Amino acid sequence: MLKIYNMKYAYSKISFLILIIAAFFVLSAEAQDKPKIAIFSGPTATIQNSYPLITSNKAREKNGLPLLKNDAGEALTDRLYYQRLAAPVKVYIEMYSAHPLESDVNELYGNPDGYINSDGSFSKRKKSDSAKPVLIAELKPEDGLYPLPYMSIQSDGKPWDATYAYPGAPFEKSRQTFYPNASRIFEEIERNGGNLYAQATYDFYRPAPAGGYTKGLPERLRTDEGSGDIPPETIGEDFFTYGPYGSSQNRMQLAKATNMVQKVMSSGDYIGSIWLEGSPSIENTSYWMGLLIDTEAAMVFNAAQRMRGLVSADGDQNIIDGVNFINSEVWADEAGRNKTGSVMIQDQVIYSTREVQKGDARPGGYVVTGGYGGVIGSMGYGPKLTFLPLRKHTYLSEVNITKIPSSVPGIKMSEDGSITTTQVPVKDSEGYLLSEAMPMVTIYKSARWKTENDGSEDAASEVDILSRIKDDLTKYPLAGFVGEGMAPYGSMISPMDAALEYAALHGYPVLKAARGNADGFMNTNPNNLFIEGYNITATKGRMLLMACILRFGTMPPAADPDHPTEAELAAIKDKIKLYQEVFHTH
């Protein structure tokens, strides 16, 4: 009998173990069923910027400091900031205070946990008519973030009234308002009802972030993807802000960021990605990434016009819309490949990144360029596509990183002053962009009523263009020029045309673009030495020209740019055809 009991007990243990294992696999399968999205932090990102941490009146009162007041001299209500509890705390919540009409139907509610009497004491039973019914909640550190008054003051006992210790303080005396990556933002959105975690899992990357760790960060504290400690970071080199400590990202950092995005998206681990950047510059970065990144996954770009913590801040909803768009898979064709290209989602509008442009610093402030399309769908009541772009993008792009060769022809000046071509390495042994090879492309804008009295067509008056040619010859083997002329023709005043033609004779690709958001399309002229930009803007044309230079290299230079031969002119025009085809199709 004992033997039978032991066998039953053994079978019971085995069955329980099987149930545990089965439950583990079910939970694992559920976790694996969630799509995975890569989140990239870009520079000067208002969408990753927060309202400054201002010392609350509660802290000022506690420390004997003057209170913050409004213009009428009344004490301000404290702004609340998401923070973490260090220990559990019991709170008494007044019933019917979540909405002004809760008490109107108080008969529908359960009993309170007790009452707070007029002297502040708690009792289980109501002792007087003035006693307030309350519900008891225990808030715990593991609950996550809670909105709380900001209690910190400065080391010298003064309150924080802005990001810095005093007006005009150097950067090292200031606190940063930009987040180093988006993980904390996602946590705050989740706490605010964003429901992001139920929809996907997220990995956070810092290709060119707006906030940085000036003292470094141990690996165990990292919330981004990466191995090892983060070394001390420098503003303007590792992270890029705007405001009193503004710093601009450069071409070399664009190469670094492009390489990171390509590595991440070529892993096959992600259904899509979201890139967060400042509202004025994201229009160009989003187009660039859509040209360069070889991926079949979705690529979404988000910005914000108002920083986090302001009334009607728009960034969180843009992020939520980006996640919903990726999860919906409306961007995918029958084979699961991206059919929309890179898109920017702002204020529930889905833009093709080739056509989107910032028009104003307000929600809804984005416009489309070119006059024919640009808006491809809406996020209202769920993602809906109404148009699909015809232009090549991502894995279809003729200038994506996979199709860029390891080296391309560039231009150099020999010791004797002659101009020759040289092979310029543009990718490393692993197939990623070399930062030092990023092309220098400069934009010049034409204007009427500019020429000298004599009406000269001589390029000599365009000293800025001629100086740039000279500087490029000594510093940049890969370079190019963009001339922005009248809409829709791209025509420029004669001296500028002559100077830009002179640049082309040196071997530099020269793009002509129309000013503003031209509705019309430029005709292609096979007889000149310029690439016609179709209906692309000068700023976006610069991005595509940079990509083309990495793909095709520079033009064959004339031995003597002042006296080119017919054969040299024909060679330049033949090379222009490669560029022209890309500008017609991308």
Image: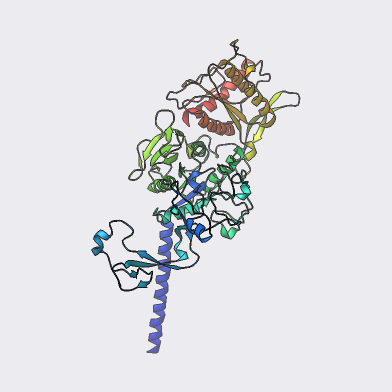
Quadrant of the rendering where the N terminus is positioned: bottom left
Between 69 and 413, the residue placed more toward the observer is 69
Tell me where residue 181 appears, x and y as whole percent.
53, 50
Between 172 and 517, the residue placed more toward the observer is 172
Q: Is residue 201 visible?
A: no
- Residue 500 appears left or right of 123: right
Between 425 and 56, the residue placed more toward the observer is 56
- Residue 261 appears left or right of 371: right
Using the image, determine if residue 268 lies above or below residue 550.
below
Q: How many marks?
A: 0
Q: Is residue 318 visible?
A: yes
Q: Quadrant of residue 445?
A: top right
Q: Residue furthest right?
A: 416
- Residue 111 appears left or right of 255: left
Using the image, determine if residue 70 lies above or below residue 419.
below
Using the image, determine if residue 241 lies above or below residue 213.
above
Between 239 and 436, the residue placed more toward the observer is 239
Please say which color scheme the image uses: rainbow
Tell me where residue 166 appears, x and y as whole percent.
59, 48
Q: Residue furthest front?
A: 73
Residue drawn at point x = 51 percent, y = 61 percent: 62
Q: Residue furthest bottom?
A: 1
Residue drawn at point x = 33 percent, y = 59 percent: 97
Tell me where residue 115 appears, x and y as whole percent.
33, 69
Tell me where residue 421 appears, x and y as whole percent.
67, 28
